Image (cartoon, rainbow, N blue to C red):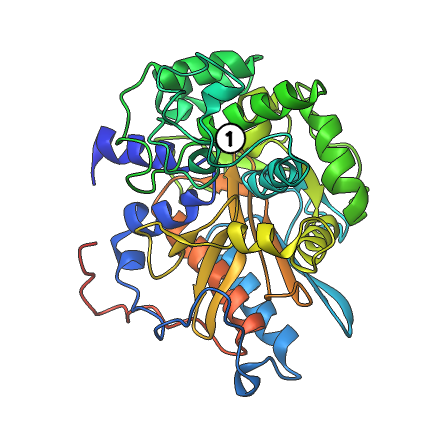
Amino acid sequence: MRGRSRSRALRRTIAGWAAVAGALAGATPAAAALPAPTPAPAPHASPQASERPGTDTRAQVQQALDAMVKAGAPGVLARVDEPTGSWTLTSGTADLTTRRGIPHDARFRIASLTKGIVATTVLRLAEAGQLELDRPVATWLPGAIHDADRVTVRQLLNHTSGLADHLDHPSFRDPQSYTRRTWQPQHLVELADGLPRAHPPGERFTYSNAGYILLGLLVEKVTGNRLGDEIEQRVLRPAGMTHTRLPLTDPHLHGPHATGYLLPDGADGTDPGALKPFTEINPSFAWAAYGLVSDARDVNRFYRALFGGRLIGPASLEQMRTPVDTRQAPVFPHYGLGLATAGLTCGEQWGGTGSIPGYVTFAFAGPEGKRRMTISVNVQRNDPKAGEMLIHGVDALNRYFCGKPYPARPSAGSSPQTP
């Protein structure tokens, strides 16, 4: 992938969990040559007892975080919550100028982890009889998109609607521009609706942030309330997520946080001064798709409440974890309703990843949510180093959940394979 085509392909993936798989597949051929992990069991599988982490787990995870920094992350934070307690590790710095440490309670933009929370809100409304997943969007929002009578709520949730991503519109070529203005949700949907469909509704998986913008409008339509209020009432408060909020246009991160950075397109990633501070942005372009601000404690609380059955019933949770093939195996092979899987060596774990100018996030949990890990990185970069940096994040997950490193990269002398 070269020149404009490579840049555009990265842009298409940078706003959500697909940024990770996209970087691995498109940003660096070496990363694409990683050997596949051991074939994973079904998505609900958990690590076998022999593969559970031992007493040196923290040191093993620390090595992976240090490798992320060496590969281009200014700083990284990882928090684990499990039945025996909680622990947090950091590497690198919160700010390249002051060199201060990363606060353990740092707030950050969780990007597409927002989708899991919005999906949970939608499922709670379905359980209450206020909407139905297999009815067309036109039932509540006639004319919202030109095929609203054919696209169902479920298809928006699992990215099989075929609706384009508004980030593919030329208006979103430069994050230094589109993050400085206010976008209305209806306009974001209109921009996506005006682009060619990826495929007919229900045919296959194609990631679309615009689909979740439309879901946000659906929540507001059926409830008569603002999306942020519904998320607060139906998810954040029951899960005890007191540090999480959905900003509309507020550019600031309130409370402790690391400075977010962006490597602009075309910048020299080897230049220490190429990373630009990018903490303060107008997040209206992200809204229901990837606009939430939170911290690692709250993210882990969400997965504990969700997988522990405190937010939705067993039938709804089963639907959330019904997998659709993403064609991104082996790293992120399946997507459900607002949730993705990580294909680790001991089996697939459910959770999500996200990327937004300034921050990248990984968060996954065991089947019942008893063991959770959230990783926050304070940079979004679109150069060849991105794949190397992100695969070390997958390695950190594998070291925690499986008790061993993710499959090693090829040696320096080996020939990279074409994806």
- Residue 258 visible? The answer is no
Count numbered badges in the picture: 1
- 272 to the left or right of 224: left
Q: Quadrant of the N terminus?
A: top left
- Compared with residue 203, is residue 230 higher up or lower down, i.e. above or below? above
- Can you give x and y, in whole percent of width and height, for residue 378 in the image? 59, 44
- Disc 1 marks which amino acid? Tyr
Which of the two residues, 209 or 252, is positioned nearer the viewer here? 209
Would you place residue 275 above or below residue 372 in this image?
A: above
Q: Is 331 on the left-hand or right-hand side of 142? A: left
Horizontally, residue 305 falls left or right of residue 260, namely right
Circle 1 Cα neighbour tier, 10 Å, few/some/many (<14 / 14–19 / ≥20): many
Q: Quadrant of residue 8?
A: top left
Taking the image as shown, residue 47 lies to the left or right of residue 198, namely: right
Compared to 109, does 166 lie above or below? above
Q: Residue furthest front?
A: 129
Q: What residue is rendered at 36% in x and 71% in y? A: 37
Q: Position of residue 65 (x, y in %)?
A: 56, 62
Residue 40 lies in what quarter of the image?
Answer: bottom left
Q: Could you say which is closer to the camera, residue 294 or residue 387?
A: 294
Q: Residue at x 30, y 32 (%)?
A: 7
Please provide percent x and percent y for residue 219: 62, 26
Q: Secondary structure at mark 1?
A: helix
Q: Quadrant of the C terminus?
A: bottom left
Residue labelled with disc 1? 212
Let me know if residue 301 appears in the view. Answer: yes
Q: Residue at x 58, y 71 (%)?
A: 400
Return the residue nearer the eye: 334 or 32. Answer: 334
Q: Nearer the viewer, residue 159 or 89?
A: 159
- Snapshot quadrant of residue 294: top right
